Image (cartoon, rainbow, N blue to C red):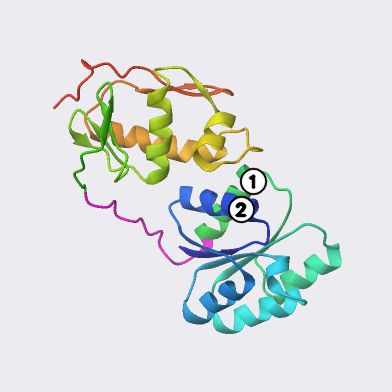
Amino acid sequence: MLILVGDDEQEYGEIIEELLRSQSHRVVLAASPESFRRFLQRSEVDLVVMSSAFAGESLPAAIWDIRRTQSAHIVVTFEERSPVEVADCLAAGADDCVRKPFHPSEFAARMEAIARRSPHPVEEAEPPAVEESATWTRSGSLRFDETTLRVRWAGADLACSKTEYEILRALAETHGRVLTHAYLNRRVWGYSSLSDATLLKGHISSIRAKLRSAGITQPLIRTVNGVGYGLAHVAEDLVPSR
């Protein structure tokens, strides 16, 4: 799905963006209410996630306006709303109203439920082409290109996303030590208040799948439940089986 996100609190907007991207959705994060409205005028989207502050003075009226021009699902995030105000938003056409602060796992589950109701298939972006560079650094059989953000294992390109690159690079730098969820959330996204694995799980799963596709039969990334992740081994002799 193509999803437009508008939130007056930058940290919430970035958390929502990352959660939706981890579910393989295409996400546009609006920088201001003006850019939010301009995007809606120019483009057709599948889902709109907006904070009440991005709607202007009348939230139900803003929902009606979106409904007149878009067939998108609408989710509203807010901090203080009475039950009557929430009912007005739902009556105006909102699919869901989510109160802040919300837990990332619950929010992700709500968005997944909406995605299941959408007739639009999930679109996955194709990984960019491999580019050669002279800026490769090495950690065991893993090689990292700091310019193009590519990762290779014994010559096999893993086609990692930027986020996956950052996670794998952090794990490789610590030579097998377990990194906590809080540390990785802060290192990769800069979130100082997020200490669980919600954002990480999807990316770790994707990295593992790409390592398997490269021919690595051993479980390279180990999970310490409730704590974090570490690399089991990055030795030179651990090469892909062909």
- Write the residue at 67% across / 44% down: 103
- Using residue 206 as the reference point, say whether residue 37 is left or right of it: right
- Using residue 194 as the reference point, say whether residue 189 is left or right of it: left
x, y (%) of residue 56?
A: 73, 75
Q: Name the residue under label 2.
A: 110
Give the camera-side residue of 58 and 105.
58
x, y (%) of residue 33?
A: 63, 72
Q: Mark 1 points at which residue?
A: 106
Instruction: Relative to 2, say whether 199 is above or below.
Output: above
x, y (%) of residue 163?
A: 42, 43
Which segment did they paint magenta? 117-129
Residue type, numbered disc 1: Glu
Measured in 3D between alpha carbons, the distance from the residue under mark 1 to the one under mark 2, in whole angstroms, is 6 Å
Report the quarter where the N terminus lies.
bottom left
Residue 197 circle label: none
Residue type, numbered disc 2: Arg
